[in-house]
Image: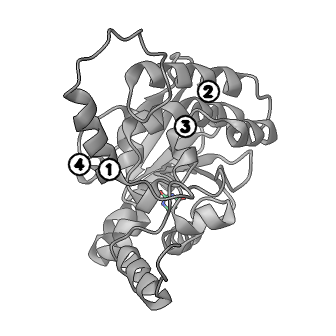
Amino acid sequence: MSPAVDPRAVESLLAFWADAGVDAAYADAPIDRLAEGAALLRARSQPQPVAAPARPVLVAGGSADVSAAVAQARAAAAACQDLDALAAAIAAFDGCPLKSQGARQAVFSRGPGDAPLMIIGEGPGADEDAQGQPFVGRAGQLLDRMLKAAGLTDRAFITNTVFWRPPGNRTPTPQEQAVCAPFVERAIALVSPRMLLLIGGASAKALLKRDEGILSLRGRWFEWTSADGGLELPALPTLHPAFLLRQPANKKRAWQDLLTLTERLDRPDRPH
Ligand code: URA
């Protein structure tokens, strides 16, 4: 018989973990990592039989596995002729490790499918995971207010570099972003915006393949190029609204970036 569990102790432990930012469970049952480690040490001290080569399995970070998942994503994305098909393909895709790390659902996009501007954030947070739409939490509400002030309401298609919430709101890894990238590229091709606004360092670095921090990248125009080189678009990195909520003094920089963006977006095409 299992010992009686004090519900107040459980509540208090859960509150402790929630305060520490642990608000998602990977699996239904607990795993005793200490026992696993002890078993591993015991096994290592035994003589090892010659092992057959292991078949690749999908784990976060393994490069062979990542290339297989990227190829799978590219094929699935290429088959999509419209955004509804793309949303369905993303939801059905099992190649991104984030999908099995506690996310409730895939979060793809919001905004008009023929928008002149595409906004690409980092990845869904808790509110987005619950509601199934990007940028609907506090950061998203600030983004919406900024877009409204810049006259951009209903002129932006909004998505992220990854479509499943990273556990504890951590930054998505480059591997997770690489696996989702073919879907992001297909979304860009289908929406066909005139330019991209890259929100935050994780988005700017992934899309532009650069290493500088966001404070150095923001407010400067770059050329985004698709993996096959067939598509090119102007892209402007800016600060993430979640960062602005923590450091409101930076809002004026983000506002300058939006003015830089709208100046180009609304500039009449020059005659050839
Ligand atoms: N932060 C992001 O980068 N994307 C979202 O969708 C929400 C918060």
The residue under label 3 is which amino acid type?
Answer: Cys
For marks 3 and 4, the one nearer the N-term is 3
Give the CA separation, mark 1 to mark 3. Answer: 28 Å
Q: Which badge, 3 or 2, comes first in the chain's sequence?
A: 2
Give the residue number, with chain letter if any, for mark 2: 73
Q: Which label sits on residue 35?
A: 1
Whole-angstrom CA distance, mark 1 to mark 4, is 46 Å
Instruction: Find out whether the residues at labels 4 and 2 contact each other: C-beta distance under 8 Å.
Output: no
Q: Is residue 155 above or below residue 252?
A: above
| Residue 27, image x, y percentages | 53, 54
Q: Which label number is shown at residue 96?
A: 3
Q: Is residue 100 visible?
A: yes
- The one of 141 and 102 positioned closer to us in this rendering: 102
Q: CA distance from mark 4 to mark 2?
A: 31 Å
| Mark 1 or 3, nearer chain start | 1
Q: Residue 21 bears which disc, if any?
A: none
Q: CA distance from mark 2 to mark 1?
A: 37 Å
Q: Which marked residue is nearer to the observer: mark 3 or mark 2? A: 3
Q: Nearer the viewer, mark 3 or mark 4?
A: 3
Q: Secondary structure at mark 1?
A: helix
The numbered mark, 4 or 2, whose residue comes first in the sequence reads 2
Q: Residues within 10 Å of mark 2 (few under 14, many from 20)?
A: many
On residue 216, the disc is 4
Q: Callout 4, which amino acid?
A: Ser
Q: Residue at x 41, y 33 (%)?
A: 175
